[in-house]
Amino acid sequence: MQAAPRPFPDLNFPSLGIRYREEEGQYLILDALRKKWLVCTPEEWVRQHMIQALVQLYAYPKALIGVEKGLQFNGLAKRTDILVRDREGAPFLLIECKAPEVALSQATLKQLCTYNAVLHAPFLGITNGHKHLFLRYDRQRGEISQIRQVPKFSSTES
């Protein structure tokens, strides 16, 4: 059931059939992967659009996409926004989602790289729904370089 008006602004994604509703004065958004309704915060609005883009536009397997999974960094509990694993279970693409009003910056890149220091995903992404930045991480060289688009899903790329 789609409520009107929408709770958050248009994003730089095509129409993806995101489902949301209003209930008891707050908006909820359907997380199709976890099959539950969540409070629709600005960051969740972006995260659900990114997840659906991965599935619908880039043919990423739903079963390999993890949402808000925990990890430990220097003894601190952290949560990744989106982590796609390859078919062998290794991290493939790590994406950090920000609210639409949050600018992509060195600080957001540093947060992403901090998480990737533990995970070692060969591809990284940052989005605020308006701008999307994707990167390739060369672990052997310790280099990060920008790529033009979402990496094609493959269990053999590294």
Image: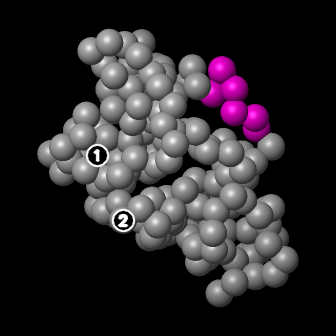
The residue at the point 27 percent across, 15 percent down is 140
Q: Please report the bounds of the magenta region as a residue range.
A: 102-108
Q: Would residue 119 appear left or right of 2 to someone viewing this image? A: left
Residue 89 appears in the rendering: no
Residue at the extreme bottom: 1
Seen from this angle, which residue lies furthest right?
5
SS class of the residue under badge 1? strand
Residue lying furthest front in this view?
Answer: 148
Q: Are marks 1 and 2 in contact (CB under 8 Å)?
A: no
Quarter of the rendering occupied by the N terminus? bottom right
Image location (x, y in percent) of residue 109: 58, 25
Q: Which sits earlier in the primary sequence, circle 1 or circle 2?
A: 2
Residue 95 drawn above or below residue 117: below
Q: Which residue is mark 2?
A: 59
Report which residue position mark 1 lands on. 85
- Residue 91 on image: x %, y %: 29, 38
For the C terminus, give its image quadrant: top left
Could you tell me the amino acid type at mark 2? Ala
Q: Nearer the viewer, mark 1 or mark 2?
A: 2
Q: Position of residue 61 (x, y in %)?
A: 31, 62
Query: For numbered disc 2, what is the local secondary structure?
Result: loop
The answer to whether residue 58 is left or right of residue 42 is left
Residue 105 falls inside the magenta stretch = yes
Q: Is residue 119 a member of the stretch shown in magenta?
A: no
Q: Is residue 37 visible?
A: yes
The alpha-carbon separation of the residues under discs 1 and 2 comes to 14 Å
Q: Nearer the viewer, residue 84 or 154?
A: 154
